[in-house]
Amino acid sequence: MANVNEAVRMLIDAIYESNQYKAYKDIKEKLEQDDEAMKRLNEFRSQRFKFESQNLNHSTPSQENYKMIQDMYSSLMMDSDISSFIQAEINLSEMILEIYKSISESIDFNLDFLNS
């Protein structure tokens, strides 16, 4: 287990040194200085989470909610800091997902049920 823990620590260090993490951290720190922008972003995230939860629970979200989320997103994308943050967050998430997929595929960890 010590070898695994050491490898995890090395992976975390490599993530910290990645361009994706550095970009995410920089824009996150900048955005956190703007309380109003953070409030708008967090409201959007909350509404989007509720919307996605409805989809996962097989209940049909209303068109009204869908439109509201689209409008919120469009409005947020007009703010360059928020737009940059969302893109940086996506880039970091994609990198972490690729790491997870590489590990799970390498150890033959069966996740086929996720594709159905």
Image (spheres, rainbow, N blue to C red):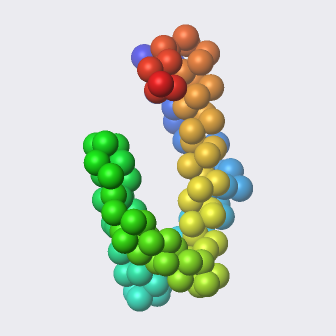
Q: Which of 14 and 91 is in front in this view?
A: 91
So how many labels did they put on this image?
0
Up the image or down, 56 lies above or below 40; here it is above
**Residue 33 rendering spot, x and y as whole percentages:** 47, 85
Q: Which residue is drawn at 28% across and 48% down?
A: 59
**Residue 20 rendering spot, x and y as whole percentages:** 66, 55
In the picture as drawn, the residue positioned furthest to the right comes out as 19
Image quadrant for the N terminus? Answer: top left
Q: Nearer the viewer, residue 57 or 44?
A: 57
In the picture as drawn, the residue positioned furthest to the top comes out as 108
Residue 32 seen by the camera: no
**Residue 74 rendering spot, x and y as whole percentages:** 56, 78
With 69 as the anchor, is 74 left or right in this view? right
**Residue 7 rendering spot, x and y as whole percentages:** 55, 27
Residue 52 seen by the camera: yes
Q: Nearer the viewer, residue 45 or 89?
A: 45
Up the image or down, 59 lies above or below 42; here it is above
Q: Which residue is drawn at 28% across and 43% down?
A: 57
Up the image or down, 102 lies above or below 66; here it is above
Dividing the picture into quadrants, the one containing residue 61 is bottom left
Q: Residue at x 50, y 71 (%)?
A: 70
Q: Which residue is drawn at 63% across and 64% down?
A: 87
Up the image or down, 22 lies above or below 15; here it is below
Q: Which of 50 and 59 is in front in this view?
A: 59
